[in-house]
Image (tube, rainbow, N blue to C red):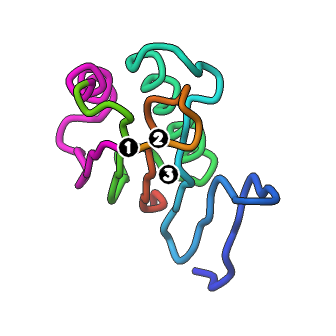
Amino acid sequence: MTSAIDRRHVGARLSETAIYNGTVYLAGQIPENSPGADIKTQTQEVLGHIDRLLAEAGSSKQNILQCQIYLTDISEIGQMNEVWDAWVPAGHTPPRATVQAQLANPAYKIEVVVVAAVAR
């Protein structure tokens, strides 16, 4: 393994992905294509972003080590969990925290932060 940090999709404020020492760190993923949509639609979009970024980094949802989910309305956790439960592989459910939080854009109902291992 290399000791260099591999940053991908680097912007002025943040990188979408940082890979270091066999671990993939994702920035908080938001529903940038479906602001204002319902929680299920926004959750599906966000999980799609996670799938794409993990695949680019040589990982997958089976390798998630930790997940943090931020919801603007915790009463929508049941609807979000319906989408999550259909997405996360059985036997590979990661440690997860879900909290209510005010997000930077009021049109976003969800933001998800993931840390995963690079697949071997």
Residue 42 in the figure: left or right of residue 85 = right
Real-space Cα separation, disc 2 to disc 3, in angstroms: 20 Å
How busy is the neighbourhood of tag 3: few (under 14 within 10 Å), some, or many (20 plus)? many
Q: Which residue is mark 3?
A: 59
Q: Earlier in the sequence, mark 1 or mark 2?
A: 1
- Mark 1 or 3, closer to the camera: 1
- Mark 2 or 3, closer to the camera: 2
Report the amino acid beneath label 2: Glu
Residue 5 in the figure: left or right of residue 24 = right
Dot 1: element? strand
Magenta-colored stretch includes residue 80: yes
Magenta-colored stretch includes residue 8: no
Asked whether disc 1 touches disc 2, contact meaning CB atoms under 8 Å apart, the reply is yes
Question: Which is more toward the observer, 47 or 92?
Answer: 47
The residue lying at 20 percent from left, 35 percent from top is 90
Q: Which residue is mark 2?
A: 111
Report the amino acid beneath label 1: Tyr
Real-space Cα separation, disc 1 to disc 3, in angstroms: 23 Å
Work out whether 80 lies above or below 28: above
Figure quadrant of the C terminus: bottom left
Q: Which residue is mark 1?
A: 70
How busy is the neighbourhood of tag 1: few (under 14 within 10 Å), some, or many (20 plus)? many
Report the amino acid beneath label 3: Ser
Asked whether disc 2 touches disc 3, contact meaning CB atoms under 8 Å apart, the reply is no
Which range of residues does the magenta coloring cover?
76-101
